[in-house]
Image: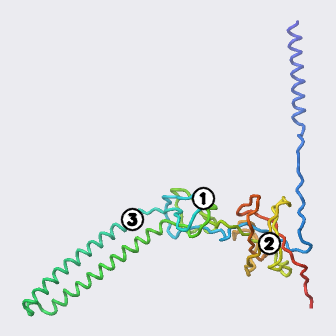
Amino acid sequence: MKSFYKVLFLSILGLIIGVASIFYDNQSSAVKIEPVSKLQPPYDDYVYGTGIIETGSTNIPVGTAIPGIVTHLYIKVGQPVKVGDALFTIDERDIKEKIRVATIKVKVEKASIQKIIHQFDDIQKLMEVDSLAISRSKYLSHKDDLALANANMELAQEQLSALKKELKRHTIYSLIDGQVLQCKMRVGEYINGNRINSPLVLLGSNTMSLRVDVNENDLWRFKPETKAVAFVRSHSELKIPLLYNYTEPYIVPKTALTGLSTERTDLRVLQIIYSFEKPDFPVYIGQQLDVFIDTNKVKKSIK
């Protein structure tokens, strides 16, 4: 009888614990939400634009005119590079074999020249003894053979030189001082030159600039030499003073971030390039900023 009440008590206790557990698990936990600070424009009269951080040299996609398999990769993301540093190498086996054959051909042409020179020397010595021993036509024929052999030799050397230059093209070198922004390449990967929209290697200089898109409807109020400031999105206290560099005088369709021609466009923009000193807080290549440009009370003239 005691065992029955004991089992009954444990059953009721387990039921109570289960119901309580379900009840408390379904309670929504308090979520702490920090409100996004409202961005206050720094000027009374301004033009707004969106800016994308890029390198001072602009972002440079690196490609190759020679398709093939990547056999060596000398870089990694974030690595600094200097002019002349090797980036990667395309398979060289085919061109090296052509160079080996061309080198042998040069040796053959050298031997051919030596043979003709020896024959020509014998003819000249014989003519010194008896000027009528060799006919003029035969003498001129040997002389032409020597000229032809020299020409073939020069051609073989030029072909060898061209192949050696072609071999250098299989290794791609940096043409700027900067850093590796992206590297999607892998050893053993086959690549070709048709990677404009999605480059495997992206380089940039060590300086930063900001490419600002300004709506064409606001261009009449834009003044190049006025003050401008950029804000980190959602952080109005993080701002960067800007220095005007130049304006690209061709209005282009605005595209979303990546700049691919396949993306939908909604308006046309003028692109303005600003430079800035690197701030105390971190900013990155490709980061989007809110930009305000002082219009200095520009008034629209109406005639």
Residue 46 to residue 120: above or below: above
Horizontal side of 113 relative to 75 (left or right) equals left
Going from the N terminus, do you reach mark 3 or mark 2 first?
3
Mark 1 or mark 3, which is nearer to you?
1
Answer with mark 1 or mark 3, whichever residue precedes in sequence. Answer: 1
Residue found 84% across the figure and 59% down from its top: 235
**Mark 1, secondary structure of its residue:** loop
Q: Residue at left 25%, top 85%?
A: 147
Question: In x, y percent, where is residue 3?
Answer: 85, 8
Q: Quadrant of the C terminus?
A: bottom right
Residue 96, disc: 3
Residue 191 or residue 220, whichever sits in front = 220
- Is residue 92 at all visible to an observer of this figure? yes
Question: Pointer 3 and pointer 2: residues touching (CB < 8 Å)?
Answer: no
Which marked residue is nearer to the observer: mark 1 or mark 2?
Answer: 1
Name the image quarter holding the N terminus. Answer: top right
Helix, strand or loop for disc 3: helix
- Identity, as a three-letter code, of the amino acid under mark 3: Lys
Q: Which residue is mark 2?
A: 266
Task: State the image quarter where residue 299 is shown.
Answer: bottom right
Q: Which residue is located at x 63 percent, y 58 percent?
A: 78
Q: What kind of element bears circle 2?
A: loop
- Which residue position is annotated with label 1? 79
Check if mark 1's residue and mark 2's residue have beta carbons within 8 Å.
Answer: no
Query: Which coloring applies here?
Result: rainbow
Q: How many marks?
A: 3
What is the C-alpha distance between the residues marked 1 and 2?
37 Å
